[in-house]
Image: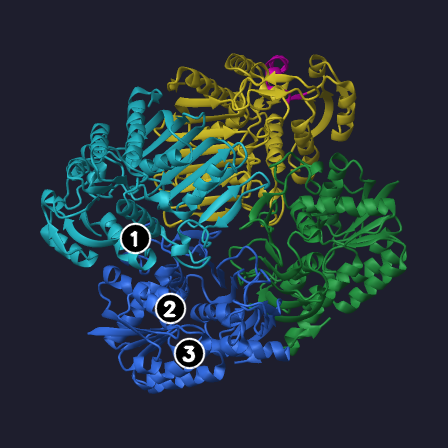
Chain colours: A yellow, B cyan, C green, D blue
């Protein structure tokens, strides 16, 4: 069976996933065959150029029509465009991979999960960092019991592209279009990793801050209001008794894509940083300090598909590994993780974080 | 004038401050002359041995009597013993250096500040990390405006001496004697550095957790209840609009004395770690990433008293620098920072953190 | 014009270059069109499987015949197979990209350069690390004069795949087939970077060591002699007066692919490590310490072809960048660097290092 | 017995050793009692001020006379002043601790060893880095066999105080007074650590370079010739079959006191850096990567004399530990390591390195 894939969106994420599809045959011979069938967007000219570069057979500006011609729908659009096309796809039993966060608000996210539940199709959410070899190894270390029961989690995700107060306005800075700012964009990843490595969150206490309250329109002189957070912090209490802190910022000078994760258990600790994604630092009981492992051995997760030891992978490889798992699940009719339940679980934490900030108190989930 | 100094306490902190006094003449010729006059404690035998090793002229078990024979009183006793002897000293116009946190509860701390206010003596609190060259440099970088206005602060202080559930009970694990656990012991330092580098805290949201609820008595078989936190987390909102997170743990495997501080401003960032105390990482506007500075140049704070460039200092040097500043302030009749106002300001944050945890909401200060 | 490409070799390097060709259209729209025309090897079955996976149109076991059907020949075979097919290709004016080291001995390398000189085709050597963004930035920093005149170079390349004395024998361990061991395999890269960043080598003093003198045949019980070095060290004197050390090892436990380069000039220093290839540490005059730059900004070399800031690249991206430059040079009829002159210059250092080791004295170049 | 100690020299090293003596009673109660009896120098005014600050009872400009009044002689003078006073002391059976390198030339060093052999006194050389807890742990790891048989050693010692071509001339830049430059000053330490951790050197190949050939007199306008090396490199072959590289530089921008040591064995590796002296990185067989150990546990070498875990030591603590060992050996009449044999062994390597550089060939030892 050849899977016909359609994308809604052709910018950064469109390129990342098109690259993934293009590379599967050489590196994942077990992946199902795929055609890049339809690319959907609004600007016909840009769309045509993108389709050419990303290897799509055709384009359309009508996402609804596209759904009839494909087996798999990648929703790579801005957050507020996640719900409607995704639900429509699932209603047609078209499989969906939706970028994160699941939606721009919790209500829409809940409707998406409902649609997924009622559909025969697979609904996955693109928490791509779960597919980094080092994160997979971290998960294995936690599950093996090597570091005991997890007591503390610490995650941060720092960028600096909004440090300049003249950096232009975009949909990512509008609450109606994005839902939230650093919280939904960066925090969604960090909170998913918290759930992946530690477990469900029981309650949250959050703090959001907008440091630059208006920014220039990209192609104009006028200032436009920023209605989302530039940075957030949150404390987490997990159902299993662990505690944690998470935070994210788009205004942290010197940090480009610094998602750093730390886990402390009763018997050991873990550390990971996205700017050095091939490394996992592990403190096991018989060790005094952290051992820095280069996660590039053939026996490490996914590495046998790639290069010999020490030939490091980049950011994009997690996306490719993710596409392999997602498409294979479709091909085999097997469940896929992270699915929309995982997506809405994160969305509930995002939502509770915002409400906690407004109410200045902890919010249960 | 030779200052007669008396210590209450002769363990870790007693040794650290006695060492400081002993080293001043060689390294700080400008420091006033000092005699280690009286060492105060309860166990006469241990006291005599300590006095001999630490270079004290005499010992006594009566702290009140000792106050009549000294010019400067170092209160190095457990937290619950900070208030009464300290207040008595100040009432006699004996200068006081009190270990942190200022007291075991806020009420006592407020009384201590009142006594300091009414006294002609100097009352200092031993936030020793302010006297590390790298922290002094961090302060200078912030004040120079090089990193702009501070927006975010992140501090953690991790130790692991309580990871073992059989690590014995001590006064540090009892709420009545210590006030709190990781919060008061470690958090006091971190919150002081937050205030030093960023400014006053406006409100706090905290979370405390006790993972091991009872521990064996040191010299017995019986278990005794742990009534303080093993770990805490907190979110801070500063009066100047900055936001922050702080946390501390005594159960973080692989971390011995890891106080890590990060500051993000509108124009740059700073990073410091106590396990590498001779380094400060600075991201200034004209730089892309952090520059790691070895803070051992002759022109760096206090370094001209010590060794040539690259000959690194240790933990104890901050204590010696601190003693120099404290004793010189007494000698010159000049104000000293950090004083008891700084101490109580931190105590208010500690207190509000505990109340926030209980009330599950933000607490104003 | 579509370039027809043929590969001799289909293992690690075959996969790396096939991946590069496959990815050019999406990431380097300016690259010429390419067909993966012919894959050449000896084992027909393995060859067919490889051709299928790597996207080649056909296969042959006759490299000479293949040369008539292609415009570009990638010589990815073991070192002793570099000379003859490469020279044959150049004689037919077929462009050649040859893996490093240029040959298994200096005589053959000299003959290859001669063939290149007489050919109308382009002859490139695959010193792929020149095409890492961080190395390109290092080159730009040196050329800008920011670190002044280079005085010292230090390079090491450490792996550990031969630590186990039972790791099997392969052609890489045979002098006749490989020329040398760690020296030719790893040192070729390091010496090329030394030449790239500092300049020509005037004389060398070397030391080679074989720690494990025989190893088991891969599929047999018998031991076979190891006739190359497990590790080498060398001192370099450059023509411009700079001095340096280089070394390589296949028996350095804990190092997988650790090529670390350091340069000291009259005004600053540089540091790079291949296990963290997205980073360059720079010490410029106005800085006290090294600034760690994440070389992932849009304005950094090649990065505009890839992902947004902070989304790190992997080892393979240097190969793709290299293929782009090589094929574009062919397409445009422009000279290509590094060419066979660069290859033989390194070969002369390799050769002099071996002779130096034997003669226990410095060897001029 | 109280040991009467006399110092020749009162600058950097004088201060370092005086501090050590002053601190022994508090931290090493087992150390013998010591009086700082006589300080010897040439400039009476500076001498008097130094004696006052360093705690010496009296001063003299006549080292020969001083020898009659002391039990222990610390030779902290410039290298060319090591031989005569040291030999005179040993002839009087006065114990000697001599700074490194042992002498300014090999002939003098050999005479010093001869004097030590014939004396009843103890003759120690101040290779202070052997007394760092992390180096002691490194030695223990090697001796335990945990990393197997050592195959490779790599040491560098980088400083940058001569980067500025206007940095003034001093005795350290004169061959007659110092013997050599970076080689004798920095290389002596590194070569001693090579011998300590690996074993005796069999032959050496060296390279010396003077980049700045004259420098201004400290208090004058005139330029004076630099007759020693600014930087050196060397390859080592050890008697046990191991190989190594060492190098040193006083012109490495951004490096203040960076002595970095790496050891690779058949089963593991070690790494140490003097700018982070509390850390040792160890790669043992059952580990994939290096474990970074903070060498501050009570059970670590010398640490029980100092502070609790994580309260890091500085550069000077190695000197204090060294003084303890040296004086205790005298007190107990036990042999001391490193002794003059260790000093001359290093001197022979220094000497052979210079001769190797001149002859452009390996030199046996």
The x and y percentages for residue D13 are 39, 67
Question: In the figure, A223 relative to C4: above or below?
Answer: above
The label number, if any, that marks residue D82 in the structure image: 3
Specify the subunit that label 3 lies on: D
Residue under the image location 48 percent in, 40 percent down: B141
Magenta stretch: give its range: A71-93
Q: Residues within 10 Å of mark 3 (few under 14, many from 20)?
A: many
Any part of residue C38 in sight: no
As measured in the structure, the alpha-carbon distance from the residue carrying label 1 to the one carrying label 3 is 35 Å
Compare marks 2 and 3 and give the one earlier in the sequence. Answer: 2
Q: Residues within 10 Å of mark 2 (few under 14, many from 20)?
A: few
Specify the subunit that label 1 lies on: B
Q: Residues within 10 Å of mark 1 (few under 14, many from 20)?
A: some
The x and y percentages for residue B200 are 38, 29
- In the displayed structure image, the side of residue B348 where residue B260 appears, left or right: right
Question: In the figure, D222 relative to B314: above or below?
Answer: below
- In the displayed structure image, the side of residue B63 where residue D43 appears, left or right: right
The x and y percentages for residue A16 are 66, 31
Q: Tell me which corner region of the image, top left, top right, bottom left or bottom right, holds residue A169.
A: top right
Q: Same chain for the residues at labels 1 and 2, yes or no?
A: no
Q: Which residue is mark 2?
A: D46
Question: In the figure, B45 relative to D30: above or below?
Answer: above
Q: Which residue is mark 1?
A: B31
């Amino acid at each position: 069976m050849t899977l016909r894939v359609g994308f809604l969106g052709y910018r950064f994420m469109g390129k990342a996933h098109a690259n993934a599809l293009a590379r599967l045959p050489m590196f994942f011979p077990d992946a199902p065959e795929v055609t890049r069938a339809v690319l959907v967007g609004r600007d016909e000219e840009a769309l045509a150029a993108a389709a050419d570069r990303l290897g799509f057979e055709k384009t359309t500006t009508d996402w609804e029509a596209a759904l009839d011609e494909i087996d798999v729908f990648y929703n790579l659009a801005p957050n507020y465009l996640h719900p409607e096309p995704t639900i429509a796809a699932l209603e047609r039993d078209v499989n969906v991979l939706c970028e994160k966060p699941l939606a721009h608000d919790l209500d829409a996210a809940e409707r998406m999960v409902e649609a997924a539940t009622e559909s025969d199709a697979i609904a996955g959410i693109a928490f791509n960092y779960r597919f980094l070899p080092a994160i997979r190894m971290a998960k294995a270390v936690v599950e093996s019991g090597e570091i005991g029961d997890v007591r503390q989690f610490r995650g941060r995700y720092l960028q600096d592209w909004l440090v300049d107060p003249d950096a232009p306005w975009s949909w990512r800075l509008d609450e109606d279009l994005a839902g939230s700012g650093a919280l939904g964009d960066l925090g969604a990843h960090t909170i998913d990793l918290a759930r992946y490595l530690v477990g469900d969150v029981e309650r949250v206490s959050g703090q959001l801050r907008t440091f630059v309250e208006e920014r220039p329109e990209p192609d104009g002189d006028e200032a436009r209001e920023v209605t989302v957070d530039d940075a957030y912090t949150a404390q987490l209490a997990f159902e299993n008794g662990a505690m944690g802190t998470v935070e994210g910022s788009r205004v942290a000078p010197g940090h480009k894509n610094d998602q750093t994760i730390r886990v402390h258990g009763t018997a050991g600790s873990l550390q990971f940083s996205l700017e050095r994604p091939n490394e996992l630092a592990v403190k096991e009981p018989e060790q005094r300090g952290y051992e820095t492992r280069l996660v590039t051995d053939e026996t490490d997760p996914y590495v046998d598909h790639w290069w010999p030891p020490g030939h490091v992978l980049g950011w994009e490889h997690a996306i490719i590994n993710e596409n392999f798992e997602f498409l294979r699940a479709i091909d085999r009719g097997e469940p896929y993780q992270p699915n929309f339940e995982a997506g809405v679980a994160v969305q509930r934490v995002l939502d509770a974080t915002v409400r906690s900030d407004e109410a200045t108190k902890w919010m249960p989930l």
